[in-house]
Amino acid sequence: MAEIKDTLADWLRDAYAMENQAVEMLERQTERLEHYPDMLAKVREHVAVTRRQADRVRECLQRLGTDTSSIKTGIGMLIGNAQSLSGIFASDEVVKAGIFNYAFEQFEIANYRVLVATARQIGDAEVARLLEENLREEEEMAAWIESNLPQLTQTYLQRKMAGQHAEAKR
């Protein structure tokens, strides 16, 4: 059982880095969404949610008697910055960001399902509960993105056809 607990701790460190990566990526997106107020509001809201999720993951690590990995966290933050900047020169950046955000939410959901199952395997109900809370929030965000991608796309296309700035601000 100790080996599984060590594996869970390692995966939790990865999850902590993943959440920090998400914060970096989302914060960069908020800088360029002036023409998309619904998406801007939801991304800002999710930044706060993501910070709370990182705090819960850290709490899980502390319950297991360990802490985060500064190396993994730093790498995750660098990757988040790179991902957010990768589409900055694309005129359809906002649509691509919506697609990427949806895919990233699915990635997070899969990770939290694995973490919850592992916490249950070692019999830590409190860690499982904390991780289930993160899972529920990620599922909510994924559902929001899924239901709003058509409208985001429509707004982008309408602005483009009208000769307005369809892209996010630079």
Image (spheres, grey):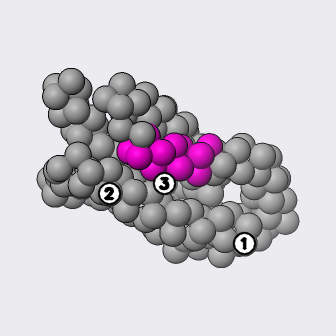
Q: Which residue is mark 3?
A: 87
**Image label count:** 3
Q: Examine the rendered structure and indicate whether residue 145 appears above or below residue 121.
A: below
* Nearer-the-camera pick, 65 or 57: 65
Q: Secondary structure at mark 2?
A: helix
The disc placed on residue 59 is 2
Q: Examine the rendered structure and indicate whether residue 33 appears above or below residue 89.
A: below
Q: Which residues are magenta?
A: 126-139
Q: Callout 2: few (<14), some (14-19), or many (20+) C-alpha neighbours within 10 Å?
A: some
Of the two numbered discs 3 and 1 in the rendering, the one whose residue sits closer to the viewer: 1
Indicate the amino acid at tag 2: Glu
Indicate the amino acid at tag 1: Pro
Give the residue at x 41% y 46%: 126
* Nearer-the-camera pick, 29 or 23: 23
Q: Secondary structure at mark 1?
A: helix
Can residue 124 be seen from the camera position used here? yes
Of the two numbered discs 1 and 2 in the rendering, the one whose residue sits closer to the viewer: 2
User: How far apart in space, not on screen, are marks 1 and 2 (Cα)?
Assistant: 33 Å
